[in-house]
Amino acid sequence: MIEQFVNFVIRPPRAEYNPDQYLWEPEFTLAGRKYKRIDLELTNGRDQTLKCSHYVPAVIPDNTALPCVIYCHGNSGCRADANEAAVILLPSNITLFTLDFAGSGLSGGEYVSLGWHEKQDLKCAVSFLRNNKEVSCIGLWGRSMGAVTSLLYGAEDPSIAGLVLDSAFSNLYDLMMELVDVYKIRVPKFTVKMAVQYMRRVIQRRAKFDIMDLDVVQFAPKTFIPALFGHASNDMFIQPHHTDRIHQAYAGDKNLIKFDGDHNSPRPQFYYDSVSIFFYNVLHPPQFPSVCSNKLDKYYNLGAFKVGAGTNESLLYEIINGLRAAGPDAGSSSAAAANFTNATKSVVELLTERVNQLSIKTDNDLDFLLDENHNLTEMDTHTAESHLEDKSHRQNEECCSYTSSNRESWGRCSSLGAASDGSSLGERPEIPSHKHKSMTLRALATPLRRIRRKPLAIPKERKNRSLWKRLKQERQEMGESLTQRFRLCLQGQAQHKRTKSS
């Protein structure tokens, strides 16, 4: 029975796996970008071979160094445990280095030491990355035994940028005594202590380390590296009070996150989000301008427009989606099909199409601006635009079904047209004179203006030509304004502020 407990500490079940089956592929795509896995071997100070993998972007700009996080697996773990970490870190331009500690996975070595010798394996990996000119600063992410390893090494190397410590134990001897109670081993207390002392001597002889030296709490006050602690609230193997003790004694900047689950349960998404934000803040990864451009070009056909390094992507998405949503079929029941069609159009085409929606095709299209006496009426921007857009709806009425609100808007705008031409659907309602004078004309979303003219006995045809000329000029100005604003957004030079719609 004592032999089983010894193996439980220094010779747990070993992970055997096929790297081509359980690791990320040598070349893979994640979040629309291409990455590659570089496999390598390192040799530690005890002449043991360490199997390692380094996940990096397939293409790195010249003279650019990326930060790297070394993932340290737990007891009975291997480098395949870092697959989730790759999803968290790589999209943020943070490379990932993972290894099988000696005695674990496919690496050499017969025994594990729960962090004592593993810190020398970690030192070997850090030295390798320090000599790599494509690596800038380094962070450590460890779980269980890997968390203890990271903390022990961080106490010796203050140049580490940040630590993420998941489910670390505070003292190995205390942990062994607790596990006796957890697994309900019915032996007297003095017998357990004698057994532990015997195990201590056996472990020293075989694995070459003293379990009494693994008092992690005594290293916490000597470590000043920013750290994020995590622990599952229902962990019965390494209970949460272990992390509480380390967190309380830790000298550097620190934060503690607890979540539901046990020692081996998957971690919740909010915890991974916290890890991503933490490493982003301590490692300061660079941003690739080309990544932004490629991503936008992938989902939006920008045509001749070029995206600058400081592009406000949220504002750009808002403008592009607004152009797509403003298609001629936006008010129909088949809007989903229209949006799918708009998704294949370039931004330049959408911009031109949107301006053309406000164009005047014939002189009769200006009748809605005239009253019965062929004089200018006054209306607001929404009414004027509604009339122009509803004309397009009216032409496609046979193939598109309109909502009741669009029908009401169509009738309201048509009632403002010239009744003498018989273009309205019904009789034009009487508008009180005091309300008629208070309305303003803001056609085509031009700056607020008021038109106050005395009615002139000018022929209708002449009035239409004048209106045609002025509206055509305003349409052109509007198109140039939209284009200029869109270019400024792409170049990251937009200085205006937008109010978020309710």
Image (spheres, rainbow, N blue to C red):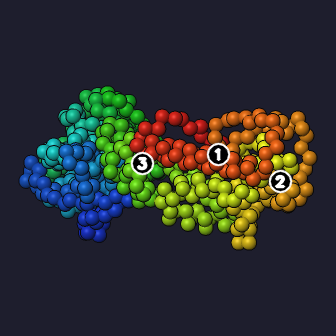
Q: CA distance from mark 2 to mark 3?
A: 64 Å
Where does label 2 land, which residue? Answer: 418
Q: Nearer the viewer, residue 54 or 406?
A: 406
Q: Are marks 3 and 1 in contact (CB under 8 Å)?
A: no
Side (left or right) of 406 relative to 486? right
Residue toward you, 257 or 416: 416
Which quadrant of the figure contains the N terminus?
Answer: bottom left
Dot 1 lies on which element?
Answer: helix
Residue 241 location (% of width, % of height): 41, 38
Q: Secondary structure at mark 2?
A: loop
Q: Amino acid at mark 3?
A: Tyr
User: On the rendered structure, is 488 left or right of 16?
Assistant: right
Badge nearest the viewer, 2 or 3: 2
Does residue 249 show up? yes
Measured in 3D between alpha carbons, the distance from the residue under mark 3 to the one under mark 1, in whole angstroms, is: 58 Å
Marks 1 and 2, how far apart at CA:
20 Å
Identified by mark 1, the residue type is: Arg
The picture quadrant where one finds residue 422 is bottom right
Q: Residue furthest bottom?
A: 398
- Which residue is pictured at 35% across the width and 30% down the height? 253
Which mark identifies residue 470? 1
Q: Residues within 10 Å of mark 1 (few under 14, many from 20)?
A: few
Placement of the C terminus among the 4 image quadrants: top right
Q: Earlier in the sequence, mark 3 or mark 1?
A: 3
Q: Which mark is residue 272?
A: 3
Residue plotted at (72% across, 60% down) = 391
